[in-house]
Image: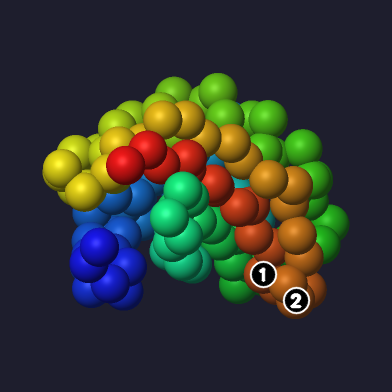
Amino acid sequence: MTNTNERFSSETLEKLFPADRTDDFFDALLGDASEGAYHISLACKDMTSDELRFEFRLTQRPGKCLACNLTYGLPQVFGRHPIINVNGLVEEIDRMLGDEANCSGWRLGSTREVTQDLHVIPLIIYLER
């Protein structure tokens, strides 16, 4: 299988999950995009024979407090929110994999605090060969 860093470059990840989706999410959730305490981005971690591991990275916005916000309930919100659209994201990743593998399902892990200004939500995609 192609190296995950080549297939899921920073440019590709930006196309899969554009930066403006953060503002759209907070506009829908809070009624004002400027109220959001963090930026949301997508990162590819690694791939095994039966899983592809990504993570949503929640990076504190200037002048905001990520630690003061409720990020621990976000996996449930992200899993069903139409702007985050995890189902659509996984479908696009499935298309990118072509004949190499098929995405057979996904799950979001629990929010982890990496640093005070960075929290991550794991996205595990199950693969079938």
Percent position (x, y) of residue 36? 60, 49
Q: Write down the residue under mark 2.
A: 115
Q: Viewer-proximal residue, 2 or 27?
A: 2
Q: Viewer-proximal residue, 87 or 116?
A: 87
Q: Does residue 97 lie above or below 8 as drawn?
A: above
Binning the other alpha carbons within 10 Å of mark 1 as few (below 14), some (14 to 19) or many (20 upward) gives: some
| SS at badge 1 | strand
Question: What residue is drawn where x is 43% and y is 55%?
Answer: 49
Image check: 97 left or right of 39? left
Percent position (x, y) of residue 95? 19, 39
Percent position (x, y) of residue 102? 30, 37
Q: Does residue 40 lie above or below 10 as drawn?
A: above
Residues at marks 1 and 2 touching, judged by CB atoms closer than 8 Å: yes
The answer to whether residue 122 of the structure is visible from this angle is: yes
Quadrant the C terminus occupies: top left
Question: What residue is drawn where x is 51% and y is 35%?
Answer: 106
> Label 1 to label 2, Cα distance in Å?
5 Å
Q: Write down the residue under mark 1.
A: 118
Question: What residue is drawn where x is 68% and y is 30%?
Answer: 76
Percent position (x, y) of residue 117? 70, 72
Question: What residue is drawn where x is 15% and y is 43%?
Answer: 98
